Image (cartoon, rainbow, N blue to C red):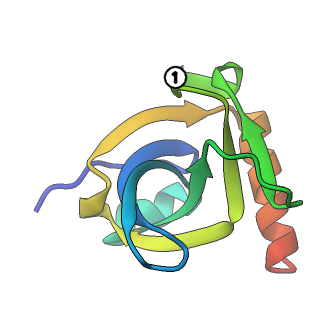
């Protein structure tokens, strides 16, 4: 089966479950797994992107000025505290890619979460 190739920093669209698993919603996610991991595995590791501003140190605000390609419908927030492994087949569309400065902020948050 053929899958889209995703790079770290890509924004994809997937059907993402709510955190309490009572339902799901089609939403953008940020691919946080490395590009080499993505090429060699059937899964992606993604962070949720939401339009709701959350009061958390794990949130990174993002707007179209921080994208090197594509666009978001509105100002959004990357929730680095909501990570999931998803099958590549669930990510059927790439809509954008964040810039290197924003990706570095994401990596810093992830390093803090995992004490790396």
Tally of marks: 1
Percent from the top left, x then y, of residue 97? 54, 34
Quadrant in which the C terminus appears: bottom right
* Residue sitting at the far top: 65
Q: Quadrant of residue 55?
A: bottom right
Q: Is residue 86 left or right of residue 73?
A: left
Residue 80: give x, y in percent of width and height: 71, 62
Q: Is residue 103 above or below residue 89?
A: above
Which residue, given by chain and number where applicable, does mark 1 sit on? 69
Give the camera-side residue of 22 and 98.
Answer: 22
> In the rendered image of this protein, does residue 109 appear above or below residue 21?
above
Q: Residue at x 57, y 57 (%)?
A: 48
Helix or strand or loop: what does disc 1 sit on?
A: strand
- In the image, taking residue 24 as reference, residue 81 lies left or right, namely right
Please state if 2 lies on the left or on the right of 20 as rendered.
Answer: left
x, y (%) of residue 8? Answer: 55, 51
């Amino acid at each position: 089966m053929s899958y889209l190739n995703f790079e770290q920093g890509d924004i994809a669209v997937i059907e993402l479950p709510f955190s309490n698993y009572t339902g799901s919603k089609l939403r953008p996610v940020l691919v946080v797994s490395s590009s080499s991991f993505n090429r060699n595995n059937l899964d992606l590791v993604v962070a949720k992107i939401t339009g709701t501003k959350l009061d958390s140190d794990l949130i990174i605000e993002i707007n179209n000025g921080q994208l090197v390609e594509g666009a978001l419908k509105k100002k959004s927030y990357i929730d680095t505290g909501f990570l999931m492994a998803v099958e590549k087949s669930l990510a059927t569309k790439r809509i954008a890619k964040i810039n290197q400065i924003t990706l570095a902020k994401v990596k810093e948050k992830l390093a803090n979460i995992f004490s790396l």
